[in-house]
């Protein structure tokens, strides 16, 4: 959805393309905490299914839904403070650019709760291996988003387009539709209600606490990772002006294009690892992780080659501005460079999550984010400003390199086989 949103923003103009990145980063930062926390639903359901406790699976999913709604409502506190947040974080911007960012940010906040509800239910189905339903609902959401965002932004027939705000409204409405479809798929079928208890919307404080205890380190890891990778990176690049900021918007969508399918494959592996660990078959868990890495690394290596060979063509899908294209051509080479290590990153963090080993990765990621990305990025901006945004992208590449190797080494130590990590 964000990929198509940026493409539409590029059709509206260079200022809109630059304006979409800061608020989109903040919205993603908020959602990523909930999305990653709700990975605990996959871990708990897959391990429960591995133990033959089917009735517990529906109850776990409902605790995830309750957590999703709570997080979405809490995030609405940023609605009245949107201007303060954006003005504080991104200072080197014009008032016109800031006004567009506030508009997009406030509208997008309304879509967080349905997005997270959809995520919780999707993780339930993924843990059971019923991934077709998740894919179908997601495709409906993506297509609806593209159509609504185009219509609301540019208008059709007698309807006059809303411009930049139409992109945000299209995404929110499509997300609501996707959430409703997922909720119907979860509660509607009698077979699911009978076997898994999906029709019983009961808050179980003990199970909710266990879910949060498992998911919180994953949520902290994801939000810290994105805080470093998204907010800090965009903040550092914003020092070099609007052109570099617009280029970073394109790069973030390219990263999503390669990362999200990889994350989907790794999520499937997380489910299989969780089931294997739940049945104490650690050898099978290691085999799943190895197979998962082979798939993910192959995909991301292919994407790296595509970025390297066809990077210029991809960039021109978003903009025709020569200055933005020139900056993006260099940045996309750095994006291509870290794809393999990002494959290592996404594979082994999901494998560790499936095994219930979540706290270690969170602490390591915090350290790397603080020292490597923030510290290294500030050093580049302060002492090597002549390198421009390329210096920041170089630091980001080294950050991904450190992450990937760290999670791989943790998996290889087999510390995750400790029975204390079992749900």
Image (spheres, rainbow, N blue to C red):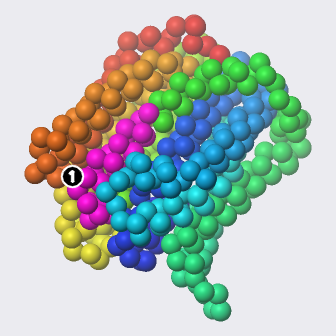
Q: Nearer the viewer, residue 26 or 340?
A: 26
* Residue at 25% in and 32% down: 375
Q: Residue furthest top?
A: 419
Q: Nearer the viewer, residue 118 or 136?
A: 118
Whether 347 is drawn above or below 285: the answer is below
Task: Specify whether residue 376 is in view.
Answer: yes
Does the magenta-highlighted stretch encompass residue 150? Answer: no
Q: Height in image: 209 above or below 15?
A: above
Most common SS among magenta residues: helix
Position of 330 compared to 67: left or right?
A: left
What span is colored magenta in the figure? 224-247
Coordinates of residue 256 in the picture (x, y in percent): 42, 52
Secondary structure of the residue carrying numbered label 1: helix
Q: Residue at x 71, y 38 (%)?
A: 70
Q: Is residue 33 left or right of residue 313?
A: right
Q: Is residue 119 above or below residue 49?
A: below
Residue 211 coordinates in the image, percent (x, y)? 67, 24
Is residue 136 shown to the viewer in this render?
A: no
Q: Residues within 10 Å of mark 1 (few under 14, many from 20)?
A: many
In the image: residue 20, left or right of residue 384: right
Which quadrant: the C terminus? top right
Q: How many marks?
A: 1
| Residue 245 colored in magenta in the image | yes
Residue 362: which quarter of the image? top left
Q: Position of residue 310 (x, y in %)?
A: 26, 64
Instruction: In the displayed orientation, state which residue is furthest to the bottom.
Output: 158
The x, y position of residue 304, in whole percent, is 28, 51
């Amino acid at each position: 959805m964000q990929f198509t949103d940026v493409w539409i923003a590029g059709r509206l103009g260079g200022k809109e393309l630059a304006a979409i990145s800061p608020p989109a980063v903040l919205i993603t930062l908020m959602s990523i905490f909930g999305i990653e926390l709700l990975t605990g639903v996959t871990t708990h359901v897959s391990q429960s299914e591995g133990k033959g406790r089917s009735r517990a699976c529906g109850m776990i999913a409902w605790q995830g839904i309750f957590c999703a709604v709570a997080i979405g409502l809490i995030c609405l506190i940023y609605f009245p403070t949107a201007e303060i947040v954006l003005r504080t974080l991104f200072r080197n911007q014009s008032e016109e650019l800031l006004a567009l960012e506030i508009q997009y940010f406030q509208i997008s906040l309304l879509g967080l709760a349905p997005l997270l509800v959809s995520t919780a239910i999707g993780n339930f189905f993924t843990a059971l291996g019923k991934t077709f339903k998740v894919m179908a609902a997601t495709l409906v959401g993506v297509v609806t988003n593209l159509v609504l965002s185009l219509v609301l932004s540019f208008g059709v027939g007698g309807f006059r387009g809303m411009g930049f705000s139409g992109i945000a409204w299209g995404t929110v409405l499509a997300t609501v539709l996707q959430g409703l479809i997922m909720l119907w798929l979860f509660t509607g079928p009698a077979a699911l209600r009978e076997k898994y208890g999906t029709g019983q919307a009961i808050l179980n404080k003990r199970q909710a606490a266990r879910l949060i205890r498992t998911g919180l380190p994953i949520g902290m890891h994801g939000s810290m990772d994105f805080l470093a990778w998204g907010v800090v990176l965009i903040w550092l690049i914003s020092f070099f002006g609007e052109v570099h900021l617009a280029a970073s918007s394109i790069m973030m969508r390219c990263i999503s294009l390669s990362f999200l399918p990889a994350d989907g494959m790794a999520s499937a592996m997380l489910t299989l690892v969780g089931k294997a660990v739940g049945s104490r078959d650690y050898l099978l868990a290691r085999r799943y992780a190895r197979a998962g890495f082979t798939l993910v690394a192959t995909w991301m290596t292919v994407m790296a080659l595509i970025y390297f060979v066809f990077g210029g063509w991809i960039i021109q899908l978003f903009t025709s501005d020569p200055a933005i294209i020139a900056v993006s051509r260099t940045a996309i080479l750095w994006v291509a460079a870290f794809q393999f290590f990002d494959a290592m990153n996404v594979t082994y963090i999901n494998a560790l999550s499936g095994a219930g080993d979540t706290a270690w990765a969170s602490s390591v990621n915090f350290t790397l984010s603080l020292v490597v990305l923030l510290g290294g990025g500030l050093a580049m901006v302060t002492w090597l400003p002549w390198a421009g945004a390329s210096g920041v992208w170089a630091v980001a590449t080294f950050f991904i390199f450190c992450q990937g190797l760290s999670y791989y080494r943790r998996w290889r130590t087999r510390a995750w086989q400790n029975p204390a990590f079992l749900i």
